[in-house]
Structures are given as C-alpha cells and as structure tokens.
Image (cartoon, helix red, strand yellow):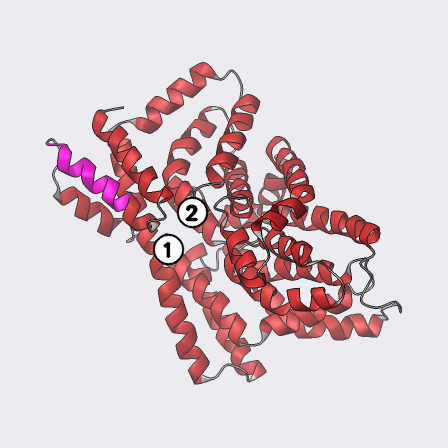
Amino acid sequence: MSDAVLIMVIIMLGLLFLKVPVYIAVLAASAYYFVVTPSVNEIIFAQQVIGGVESIALLAIPFFVAAGIFMNYTGVTKRIMTTTFILTGRMNGGLAQVNILLSTLMGGLSGSSLADAAMQCKLLVPSMEKHGYSKSFSTVLTAASGMIVPLIPPSVGMIIYGSITNTSIGKLFIAGIGPGLLLCVTMMVMVRKMSINRGYTPIRETKITFKEKIIAIKPAFFPMLLPIIIIGGIRIGAFTATEAGAVAIIYALILGLFYKELRLKDLMKGSKETIGTATSIMLIVAAASTLSWILTKERIPQNLTAWLVNTIENKYMFLFVVNIFLLIVGMFIEGNASMIVLAPLLAPVAIAYGIDPIHFGMIYVFNSAIGAFSPPMGTLMFVTTGITKCSTKDFMREAIPFYILFAIDLILLTYFPIFSTFLVELFY
C-alpha cells in the first residue's frame, strides 16, 4: 500500500469519526489521492464521480424509495397494522409481537429500516407504554425489529451491495427472505418468553374466529402482493430488478387511487421526500465509485485476497474473522458507508475461498443490520432513542438478550448457507 493510499484512508476514517457526511469524507479522501499522485490525471476523478451513478441498476434505488414513501401516504401502514393486531392479539406480549410482525411485513414495502423504526416509535411505542411495557424494552424492540427491514426485499442495501460487487440483485432479493424470516421468528419466540416472565399480557383473550382472520387479512392483501409481484416478475423475466422499482411505484399509486387516500398534496410531498433520500444515497454511491477505482488501481483487493488466502487456512475461519471485523466496524460506521468501502475488498476474497457470493452478501447485510443496532454510533439506536427519549444506558442494558439472539442467528446464517441459498436454488 502506497503512502498516498494510507494517508487517504486515514483522512477518510478521520472525517467519518467526526461525523462529516459520508460522501464528503470519501470524496475528500479520494481528491487527496488524485492531487498527490502525479501519474494520475485529475480528470479521472470527475469521470468516476459522474460515471459511478450512471449504472442502470442504480435506478432501482430512487424507484423503491419512492414506492415505499408513497405506500405510507396511501394508508397501507395503517391497514397492515390492523392486520397484525388481530393475527398476534392472543400471543403473550401481543403489542410486542405486533411490532415485530409489522416490521417484517413493512420490510417488503418500505425498504428503509430507519423510516420503519421512526414510524413505529410514533405509532406503537406510546401504546406499548400504556399497556405496561417499559420505555426501554419498547424502544429496544422497535430498533431490533427495524433490523428485519434491510433483509426483506426490496432492500436498498442489497441494491447497493449488488451494484458494487456485480452480484445479481434479483437473487439477493430472493435470498433475503430466509434471513428475514429467521430473524422474525426467533425474535418472536424470545419476546414471547420475555413477555411471560415480565407479565406482558396478550391484547385479547378470546379466540380469533376464521371470519375475523379473513377480515384482518383483507385490508393488507393487495399491499402484501407487492413483494410477490417484484420477485415473481424478476424470476419469470417480465422485468429486471431496476424495472421492478418502476412497477412498485405504479402499484403504490394504484393503491392510493383504490383506497382514495393519496391526494395531490401527498404526491408532491412524497416526491420531495424521495428526491432528498435518493440524492443522499446516490451521492454516497458516486463517491464509492471513485474510491473503488483507486483501490483497484493500487491492486488492494488482489493483494488483500492473496494475503488472506495465505494467512487463513479455511473459509470457516475466514467467515469468523469477517464477522468479528464487520461487527466492530458497524459499531462506528453506518452500514452503507462501510459497505461501499469494504464490500469490493471482501467479496472477491470470499469467492476465492469458494463461498457463494449470494450467501456472503446476506452475511454482510446481516452484519450491517446488527451494526445499526449497536452503540456507540448505531443509527437505529439513535433514531429510536431520539424519538422515545430513552437513555442510551437503559437501551444498552435492555438490549443484552437481543445481542445474544443476534449472535446465534448470525452463526446460523454464516455456517448454514441453506438459510440464504435455498430459495435462490429453488427459484433459479
């Protein structure tokens, strides 16, 4: 590694720790490299920044962001919440189970864990506190359930990962269903046991009749068709993952007209939110493109691959080391930011060890989700505690059982590829 690259990395990490916006930190570090390296033409810097966002695949990001935002304005969230209330009402810790199931179902619509967590903090946490749940438990659970969102397709994180590692986004979408359901089911089981121990009672005692179940599912039926349409359409070749984003927007607008809740004012407001969110993501991708060019020119991925393959004997130890490394990185750097720097480095190494690229992608996304939940800089932790006014100390103390659960799930996902690859092999 040259001195210019070493200083570039130090500049970038320093700016990230100072909470400078990710794209500025990466661009500033990359600009330094171009300035101090005489053999590289500065024009390439501009070419890489502009060319980095010209990929057709990246159009899926603003499309799915828009679809998720428009879904919120069509009353979909309210209808799905009603469904989850009835389906989980008789479970111990009924409202807590609603929280988890709502995140799982909304993950297939919003694609944004922060948006989902913020929404549930406002809608569910006050109700949970009124029913006797502690503020810290309600906050931690909301942040933990938000981790399911980036695993359920469509996921912005998967789109970014697929784009920068040349991995099939369609296959990543399908692969995410297994890990998402694994986290959902194990979390519901643990919360049930915790609720019994703490006396968190069900929402209702009477048995749910078949007619009530049908009535509960009916409002959420059409919204929940969206993930099926996306995955099914990609699989049969009706449209690509990028075109699926456009289909999702059209479907969201149709639902808005069908439910008669999407007004022109909401459409304009949603478009404005889409522009702001998508722009911030695309700026990060543009910066990442420049950084990836520098790393490739300096042969960092190739050298790292050779070093790791010669140092670590087998893929199982490699996966163990990667998990520890990514968990530590995730505690300090936002998931998408670490992904654009580390994924192009680690993905080729994983392939060299014979690890399925789809499987490794799921491991990476899951680690990023855990990082978002973890102090000191976890975004999910900050968003939820900021809204509910729960102290970080109480959050960390309440989160201990969840960290144990996440560690178990991560081990299962890492060393049993079937959770990631079964549906992919079945569909393809």
Amino acid type of the residue tagged 2 in the rendering:
Asn
Q: At x 57% / y 58%, what residue is drawn?
A: 107
Residue 329: x %, y % from top left: 46, 37
> The magenta stretch spans which residues?
26-38
Residue 181: x %, y % from top left: 66, 49
SS majority, magenta: helix
Q: Is residue 27 magenta?
A: yes
Q: Is residue 302 magenta?
A: no
Q: At x 59% / y 41%, what residue is drawn?
A: 420
Residue 66: x %, y % from top left: 44, 67
Which element is circle 1 on?
helix
Q: Mark 1 — residue?
A: 281
Residue 56 left/right relative to 178: left
Work out whether 29 lies above or below 284: above
Q: Could you say which quadrant of the image residue 274 lies in?
A: bottom left
Q: Name the residue nearer the viewer: 189 or 83.
A: 189
Query: Quarter holding the N terminus?
Result: top left
Amino acid type of the residue tagged 1 in the rendering:
Ile
Residue 239 left/right relative to 196: left
